[in-house]
Amino acid sequence: MESAILNAPPALAPAALPRLIDALVEQGWYVGEDVLDAALCQELHAELMARAEHDALVAAGIGRGEEHALRRDIRGDAIQWLDRESQAQRRYLAAMGELQQALNQALFLGLFEYEAHFAHYPPGAFYRRHLDSFRGRANRVVSTVGYLNPNWPADGGGEMVIFDAIDPAREVARVRPEAGHFACFLSETVPHEVLPTRLPRASIAGWFRRNASLGGLVDPAR
Ligand code: OGA
Ligand code: MN
C-alpha cells in the first residue's frame, strides 16, 4: 500500500545527502555506512535471494548492444533489472529519484533517468577493475551501489575497491558489502572493482544517465 511508504522511515538517511554531494564534488566518490534503511535492505535482500534460488537471474555480461558478451573472467555476477514489481523496489527507486533531484540541484548534472539492477555474486565471483561509462558517450554519469548483506563477516571478501581517477594504481576506498552501506561515484572517471567474494553477495548497482541521444549518439538498448 502506498500509505506504507509515507509511514516508513526515509529509505536513504537524509543526513547522508550533504556529505554525499560534498564528497562527489571534492573527490568524485562517496562511501557511507547506515545510509540505506535496514528494513528496506532486508526486504530487498530476501527478494534477490529468492530470485537467485529460483534461477530467475541472468548471467551478467559486458558491453552494450551487439558488443554484449559473457566474460566470466571479467565478471561473475547474475543480475535482474529492477522492474518496480515489489514495494521494496519502488521504495528504493523513489529514494534514488530524490537523490537525482538533489544532485541536479547542487551540481547541475542534468541527470534525467535512473536504471538499476540487483546483482548476485556467488562464492568465488568477482568483477575486475572497470569504468561504468566511457567518456564521450552520453550515458552513465553517476553510479550508485547499495549493499544488502546482513552481518557480512570481516573475512567474507567481496569488497568493492575504488581507485583514484587520476592515478588508477592508487586505492582510495574499500567498501564492505554490508547492508546499509552505500557508494556513489562518477561513472566516467572512477575505476573500481569487486574482489572475489567468499559468500553469496547481494547488491543493487544503478546509474543516473543523461539523455542518451545527446550529441547524436544513440545508446543501444541493453
Ligand atoms: C557494477 C559494479 C559494484 C558492486 O555493477 O558495475 O561495479 O559492488 N558493482 O556491486
Ligand atoms: Mn561498476
Image (cartoon, grey):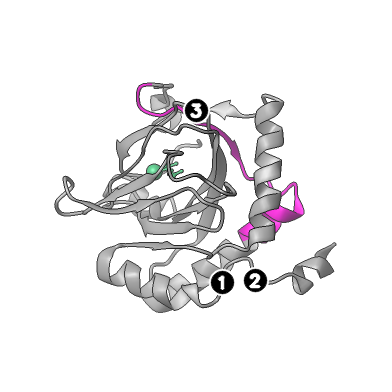
Residue under circle 1? 13
Q: Residues within 10 Å of mark 3 (few under 14, many from 20)?
A: some
The amino acid type, in three-letter code, at marker 1 is Ala
Gap between marks 2 and 3 measured at Cα: 32 Å
Asked whether 91 falls inside the magenta stretch, the response is yes
Residue 181 to residue 58: above or below: below
The amino acid type, in three-letter code, at marker 3 is Pro
Q: Nearer the viewer, mark 1 or mark 3?
A: 3
| Closest to the observer, 158 or 114 | 158
Whether residues under marks 2 and 1 lie with C-beta atoms below 8 angstroms apart, the answer is yes
Residue 83 to residue 143: above or below: above
Residue 217 lies, in percent from the top left, at 36, 45
Residue 34 lies, in percent from the top left, at 53, 64
| Image point (76%, 73%), residue name | 6
Residue under circle 2? 10
The image quadrant that residue 106 belongs to is bottom left
| Image point (44%, 26%), residue name | 124
Residue under circle 3? 123
Asked whether 84 falls inside the magenta stretch, the response is yes
Q: Nearer the viewer, mark 2 or mark 3?
A: 3
Decide if ligand 1 comes within 8 Å of the CB at mark 3: no
Decide if ligand 1 comes within 8 Å of the CB at mark 2: no
| Closest to the observer, 114 or 25 | 25
Q: In the image, which residues are magenta? A: 73-93
